[in-house]
Image (cartoon, rainbow, N blue to C red):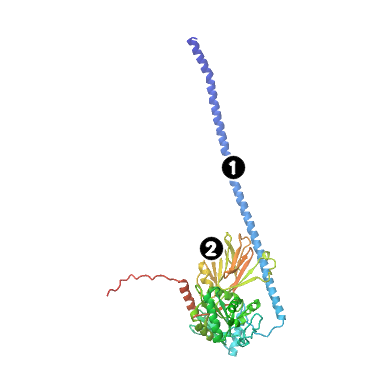
Amino acid sequence: MGPWSIANSLVTFDSKMEPKSKQFENGWSHKCSQRSVEEQLQESTIGDGDAHLVEFSVAMRTVGKALREVAESKARAKNEAAEWKRKYELERLRNCSLERGQQQELEPEQEQEQCQSPPDSWSPDESLELEKQESENGTENSGGSSNGHCCKKDGICSQQVLRSHSMKSNNISGFSEASQPADKASFRLAWGCMGEKATRRHKHDVVSFECGNIETANRSSKQITLQWDSPPQSVFILLKPNSESVNALCKEMIRWLREERGIGVYVEPTVRKELLDDNTYFKFVQSCEEEDEVSNLHSKVDLVITLGGDGTVLWAANIFKGPVPPVVSFSMGSLGFMTPFQSDHYKERLETIIKGPVYITLRHRLNCQIVRNPDNVKEGEDPCHPESHLVLNEVSIDRGMSSFLTNLECYCDNLFVTSVQGDGLILSTPSGSTAYSLAAGGSMVHPQVPGILFTPICPHSLSFRPLILPEYVTIRVQVPLNSRGQAWASFDGKDRQQLSAGDALICHMSAWPVPAACDQESTTDFLRSVREGLHWNLRKQQLSDEPTNTK
């Protein structure tokens, strides 16, 4: 093949290849344009999807808000219905109590003087009328009226239990008739100011408004003294269990009371059994085993003696559901906030108390009632008889074993106060201010300061601080129907009760305080227990920066 033929073939090849390259270029450009269109379509689709998601989220938020409003309105309706049910049950309870009272009035009454409790309310008109009557008759009551009834103005008057009591019960054996006291001892209470006997104004008047000038009575320095009208005839001794030193002192004290003072002794049934097992000499010691006898124990004993710590005092207060005789507490425990007397000199102390007069501290108690939601009433329970407890220290409401925060609605005289969200709530007396309430951040309060301590337990709020409410209010703590968990109530650390949704705990100050005898006087005993028991404000003294005198 010659050179011209080779050239011609190359030209022919180039001519054939040129359209293919153009076709390739056209195809590549087509693919690029198609990809760009797909990307644009995809971007537009994503944009439309985001817009739809935004619209959907807005719609869901609107629906959620509407559902929450519906749930809240439903919960409010349920709470209102539960509140009406609770009011109905309370009204039913009052009607039942009135019916029982009417039935008791129809029964034949025995001729005996009974202790009359202070009234729940006392109108000023009635008080003024009584004062006019007393001024006309020229009588002056120091602790109670001469006819044995409460004057209703002091709130605390002399114990009216002068009736004879029978001591011939079947469970009491070995007690001679000669040693049986004929009557229960009586006493009078007197109010003193700065160590002196109180005048009529300091006793009865809180505020005077003579000549248009308002003046408060000097109540902060008042001391209450107890004077026996007749010597005590019987005592009730309570012991700290499982303590050899306490048992030995109890035996020695019983011998001394029997032989030296001729005073009858009551103990608990288990203690009496142990005494008889040890020596038949103690067969004169009495005990109350039946529930009715225990409920009437305050009418048989003149004095209560506790040998132990504060827990023994709490147990003594728990035994007496109504009036409490004067309590003399000997310190044989740990801290001893409520046990001012030392056991080493018990004879001298008891001689002083029996002789009188003696300062006393009125330790108020809380009356607590559990009102169940009608839906939570168990089979066999009577809604007309709510569970009632008397506490000397505190009632605590906590979350128990639940991992959720406690949700409690609190009302003061039917006025909503706050909603507690945390570990729980403590309602304490001034006597219990140095116990659980103190550990939860509450203040220490003198036991004769009238008030109710409102102390939260680990609240989930930095602004939730403890309160001290006046002693005349009624506090209601309610578990709301929409609560996640249940609550538990403990009364002086015992009788733990479950509170379900809709249940309520109603607390108010009891009319029956615990009159505790003082070693010196109320304020001195309180400050001494705070300093010695808690080492309050104990710190090293700051060194002086002044140069020492070397002369």
Residue 509: x and y in percent read 58, 74
Q: Residue 216 carries which label?
A: none
- Frontmost residue, 486 versus 40: 486
Decide if residue 519 is on the left or right side of residue 270. Answer: left
Question: Number of callouts in the render?
Answer: 2
Q: Work out whether 92 lies above or below 39.
A: below
Residue 444 visible somewhere in the drawing: yes
Image quarter hosting the C terminus: bottom left
Q: Residue furthest left?
A: 551
Residue 44: x and y in percent read 57, 39
Q: Residue 459 carries which label?
A: 2
- Frontmost residue, 278 versus 500: 278
Residue with the mark numbered 1 = 49
Q: Which of marks 1 and 2 is nearer the N terminus?
A: 1
Residue 382 in which image quadrant? bottom right
Q: Residue furthest top?
A: 2
Q: The residue under label 1 is which amino acid type?
A: Gly
Decide if residue 344 is on the left or right side of residue 98. Answer: left
Residue 427: x and y in percent read 56, 69
- Frontmost residue, 301 versus 431: 301
Residue pictured at 57% horizontal, 40% vertical: 46
Residue 93: x and y in percent read 68, 72
Q: How far apart are marks 1 and 2 (CA)?
A: 46 Å
Label 1 crowding class (10 Å Cα cut-off): few <14, some 14-19, many 20+?
few
Q: The residue under label 2 is which amino acid type?
A: Pro
**Which secondary structure lies at badge 2?**
strand
- Frontmost residue, 287 versus 433: 287
Residue 302 in which image quadrant? bottom right
